[in-house]
Amino acid sequence: EADGGGGGRAEDELLGGIERELKDLHEVWAALQGGWQVIEDLMDLSWSAVQPHKVRRTIEDLVVQLQKLPARVRSYEAYDRMRGMVKKCQAVTLVLADLRSEAIKDRHWRLILD
């Protein structure tokens, strides 16, 4: 070996481990990217375009997609963060339904926004 110390094998193992980790991170990102896009799209909806039942269904579909991801993807913190965001979105959908209700009149909105 050129370095005379025999460190080439250890370096190869280290680089192999780093390469595997980068490959796994790429897989995690690819698996979660679509979910983040769904969340961003929901957050970008204008109030007039919000349909609570469709938002709820979209979030429920996202929960199912997350549950179907392989265990190696679910072991990363990025997955946990997305799952937490989805749970928050689920809680918000309940409030959305109430706010979009016919029972909320213009006078109520004036009180809410003031």
Image: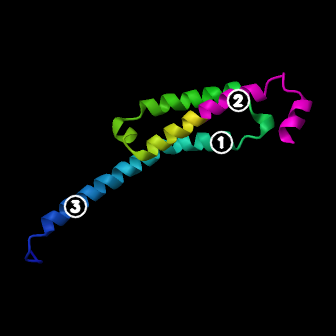
* 107 drawn magenta: yes
| Mark nearer the N terminus (1 vs 2) | 1
Amino acid type at image mark 2: Val
Q: Position of residue 16 (x, y in %)?
A: 24, 58
Quarter of the image with the C terminus in it: top right
Q: Are marks 1 and 2 in contact (CB under 8 Å)?
A: no
- Three-letter residue code for mark 1: Asp
Query: Which secondary structure is most common in the magenta stretch?
Result: helix
Examine the image and state in which quarter residue 4 appears.
bottom left
Magenta stretch? 89-114
Q: Residues within 10 Å of mark 1 (few under 14, many from 20)?
A: few
**What distance separates the C-alpha of mark 1 from that of mark 2?**
18 Å
Q: Is residue 6 left or right of residue 60?
A: left
Q: SS class of the residue under badge 2?
A: helix
Question: Residue 105, located in which quarter of the rendered image?
Answer: top right
First reached walking from the N terminus: tag 1 or tag 3: 3
| Above or below for 26 versus 60 | below
Circle 2 packing at 10 Å, graded few (<14), some (14-19), many (20+), is few
Give the x, y percent position of residue 70. Answer: 37, 35
Mark 1, residue position: 41
Q: Residue 95, labelled with which disc? A: 2
Pointer 3: what residue? 14
Q: Residues within 10 Å of mark 3 (few under 14, many from 20)?
A: few
Regarding mark 1 in the picture, which secondary structure is present there? Answer: helix
Disc 3 residue type (three-letter): Leu
